[in-house]
Image (cartoon, rainbow, N blue to C red):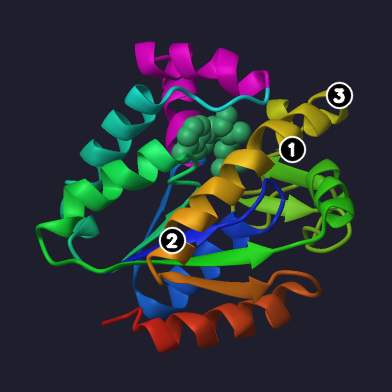
Amino acid sequence: MILVLLGAPGAGKGTQAGMLAAATGAAHVATGDLFRAEIAAGTPLGLAAKEFIDAGRLVPDEVTIGMIRARLAEPDAAGTVILDGFPRTVAQASALDEAFGASGRTISAVLLEVARADLEARITGRRVCASCGRSYHLVNKPPQRAGRCDACDSPLVTRSDDAPETVAARLANQLESLAAVADHYRTSGRLRVVDGSGRIDAVGGRLAAAAAEIGTGR
Ligand code: AMP
């Protein structure tokens, strides 16, 4: 099955999808991470995506859909997949339905709901490892050693699209399309809403319960 984890920027999708994937053995597929890997590798796709990402805008659908189709065709995506950051538009959601509807794979969505005021604090406090991409938060999920990654000891940096001057634009751009995507799943009876506020482990417990009800891991 495919579990679509929906949420605004800063809602905790990456952290929670990573924890859920580790606990269930599902594959964690994050479009933001795929784009960042393409940018780091200097590919044409990465170069095209970078200008949108740095401006806090969505990468065009045709680029994003092509990239995710290729990723979902890889062997580790044959079982349960947790999709983090995709779909972000109704066109992307429809493309996902079309790609997997015929195969009989179920697609269910969980929306991590977080108040707007909390989103900004979560984004501006976020730091990521420059080397392995692991994500931290200055207050909510600090590294063991300040400024260094727990896993590989590389320096922690602020994501280019997390700069305070872009955060408001990014939220404004993305909240509207998030609502439309949530509606896409709600009207087809495939949406669950999970309270994404509070401690990481508390949110993780609520998400795991919702995922178990849907049948993640099967
Ligand atoms: P994320 O790491 O999920 O916050 O994604 C970082 C940025 O990558 C987003 O702000 C978008 O610019 C871009 N991005 C990620 N996923 C998508 C998507 N499904 N559609 C369009 N752009 C995306």
Q: What element does badge 2 sit on?
A: helix
Asked which secondary structure carries label 3, the reply is helix
> Magenta segment: does it hold 13?
no
Q: Residue at x 67, y 57 (%)?
A: 150
- Cα–Cα gap, marks 3 and 1: 11 Å
- Magenta span of residues: 33-55
Mark 3 crowd level (few <14, some 14–19, many ≥20, 10 Å Cα): few
> How much space separates mark 2 and mark 1, taking CA atoms?
21 Å
Horizontally, residue 135 falls left or right of residue 101, namely: right
In the rendered view, tell whether residue 126 sits above or below residue 188. Answer: above
For label 2, the residue is: 185
Q: Which mark is residue 165?
A: 3
| Residue at the front extreme of this rendering | 187
Residue 92 quadrant: top left
Q: Residue at x 44, y 46 (%)?
A: 86
Residue type at mark 3: give it.
Glu
Closer mark to the observer between disc 2 and disc 3? 2
Judged left or right of residue 174, residue 139 is right
Residue under numbered circle 1: 171
How busy is the neighbourhood of tag 2: few (under 14 within 10 Å), some, or many (20 plus)?
Answer: many
Q: Amino acid at mark 1?
A: Leu
- In which quadrant of this rendering is ligand 1 seen? top right
Marks counted in the figure total 3
